[in-house]
């Protein structure tokens, strides 16, 4: 069973909406399980639920059509809802074939007479359909009902008449009145109309520069993809390029999965002079306290650490590291040299209900090893970039930054050496037992 996200329900409105569709198609347990299995690998919880419900809508439409019009052939095998590169972003059943018609199955809102529908199924030529079928899903009772349909041309006329705009979440808000609720009219069209009677948009070319620009935005925000949806990062103009290029959809999905698999560097353990195995495997080594000198390790190179030089540089900049601070470091190696990455943390105020903690990041050199000539340091939280500065001569100073967060707030760090070697550090967070 899929966990349904909570929402604010108007029970009166819900009952009225259900009353519009008294004839439901029952979904078999096998159909429900198929939709559930399909949604398991969707990254975001809210999208996972939408994919599950839309999967039920697609399966329900196929069963409904088989019951009402067994003479019509339907193929749902290539529907976008079954394809991960679409399903993780677009909860819609495009690329369904009924006879010679392209059909898109959409899930109706059960709680409002307005439906929030993805703009891409109308505006992206490869996803556009002759008919848009609205299906109402009652998940708890495994029932699906036909709720209306409209053609692509009817949508275009209505959009122009009402000056419909794309919302910030990449959806259109479309009223139920746009859809024809007469199921017999739909079946008559599917049986008697010719596909060329409904004009679909022509494929448009996208420049390589546009594709590169969108790909670059995905790359720059890859540490946030596991928690953010595309519409929270890309513009609507970007979205039109994004949906028209399957390779960008795949790149987004692959990058988001990698971000989702990143282990948390729990600095809360450092405060208790501990380090977890996952952090150790990433190359982090605890430093002794209170002096924050290197902890005794088997590797001799750690004994000759130069953190005292880093500390002196920080104190010159007015940064004082308290005795209760704890830290660790790891080396970042590239062709142009080696960077020693220091991360120091401490709790600022322990008396508050939600205490704040500080993360201090400093980039130094490994003793006896050349260092890259230039460095760039960027720190982000889940919403924005907090620090982004460069040091163009590493022999003349130390590049450092400090950020403050609440318990449960994470920070992502990216280090770039000589403008070509990039290191994306898994997120830092403070979790207390």
Image (cartoon, rainbow, N blue to C red):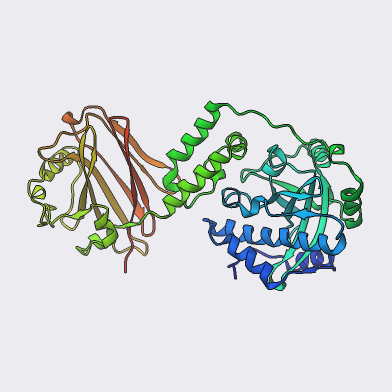
Q: Residue at x 80, y 41 (%)?
A: 152
Q: Residue 101: which quarter of the image?
A: top right
Residue in the image at 18% along x and 39% along y: 364
Q: Position of residue 117 (x, y in %)?
A: 70, 49
* Residue 112, image x, y percentages: 75, 58
- Splitting the image into 4 quarters, where does residue 407 fall? bottom left
Is residue 119 visible in the rendered image? The answer is no
Q: Nearer the viewer, residue 71 or 107?
A: 71
The answer to whether 344 appears left or right of 30 in the picture is left
Question: Residue 372 occupies which quadrant of the picture?
Answer: top left
Q: Is residue 115 visible?
A: yes
What quarter of the picture does the N terminus occupy? bottom right
* Quarter of the rendering occupied by the C terminus: bottom left
Q: Is residue 394 above or below residue 168?
A: above
The answer to whether residue 348 is left or right of residue 111 is left
In this picture, is 267 found above or below 367? Answer: below
Residue 277 image offset from top left, x and y in percent: 26, 62
Q: Residue at x 26, y 47 (%)?
A: 360
Most foreground residue, 18 or 63: 63
Q: Residue at x 83, y 47 (%)?
A: 150
């Amino acid at each position: 069973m899929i966990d349904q996200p909570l929402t604010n329900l108007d029970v009166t409105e819900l009952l009225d909406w259900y009353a519009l569709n008294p004839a439901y198609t029952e979904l078999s347990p096998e159909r429900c399980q198929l939709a559930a299995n399909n949604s398991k690998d969707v990254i975001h919880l809210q999208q996972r639920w939408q994919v599950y419900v839309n999967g039920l809508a697609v399966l329900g439409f196929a069963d409904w059509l088989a019951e009402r019009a067994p003479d019509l052939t339907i193929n749902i095998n290539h529907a976008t809802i079954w394809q991960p590169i679409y399903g993780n972003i677009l909860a819609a059943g495009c690329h369904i074939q009924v006879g010679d018609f392209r059909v898109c199955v959409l899930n109706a809102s059960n709680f409002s007479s307005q439906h929030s529908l993805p703009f891409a199924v109308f505006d992206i030529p490869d996803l556009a359909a002759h008919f848009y079928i609205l299906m109402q899903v009652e998940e708890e009772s495994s029932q699906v009902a036909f709720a209306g349909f409209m053609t692509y041309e009817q949508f275009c006329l209505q959009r122009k008449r009402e000056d419909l705009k794309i919302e910030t979440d990449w959806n259109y808000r479309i009223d139920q009145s746009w859809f024809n609720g007469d199921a017999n009219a739909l079946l008559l069209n599917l049986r008697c109309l010719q596909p060329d009677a409904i004009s679909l948009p022509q494929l448009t070319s996208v420049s390589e520069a546009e594709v590169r620009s969108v790909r670059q935005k995905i790359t720059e925000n890859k540490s946030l993809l596991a928690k953010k949806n595309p519409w929270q990062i890309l513009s609507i103009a970007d979205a039109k390029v994004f949906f028209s290029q399957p390779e960008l959809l795949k790149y987004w999905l692959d990058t988001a999965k990698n971000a989702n698999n990143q282990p948390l560097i729990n600095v809360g353990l450092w405060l208790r002079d501990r380090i977890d195995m996952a952090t150790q495997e990433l190359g982090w080594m605890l430093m002794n306290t209170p002096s924050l000198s290197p902890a005794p390790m088997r590797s001799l190179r750690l004994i000759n650490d130069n953190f005292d030089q880093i500390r002196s540089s920080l104190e010159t900049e007015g940064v004082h590291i308290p005795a209760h601070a704890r830290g660790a470091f790891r080396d970042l190696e590239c062709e142009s040299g080696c960077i020693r990455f220091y991360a120091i943390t401490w709790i600022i105020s322990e008396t508050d209900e939600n205490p704040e903690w500080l993360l201090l990041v400093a980039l130094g050199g490994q003793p006896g090893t050349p260092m890259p000539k230039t460095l760039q340091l960027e720190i982000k939280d889940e919403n924005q970039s907090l620090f982004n500065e460069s040091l163009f001569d590493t022999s003349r100073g130390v590049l450092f930054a400090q950020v403050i967060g609440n318990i449960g707030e994470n920070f992502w760090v990216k280090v770039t050496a000589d403008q070509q070697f990039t290191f994306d550090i898994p997120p830092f967070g403070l979790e207390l037992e």
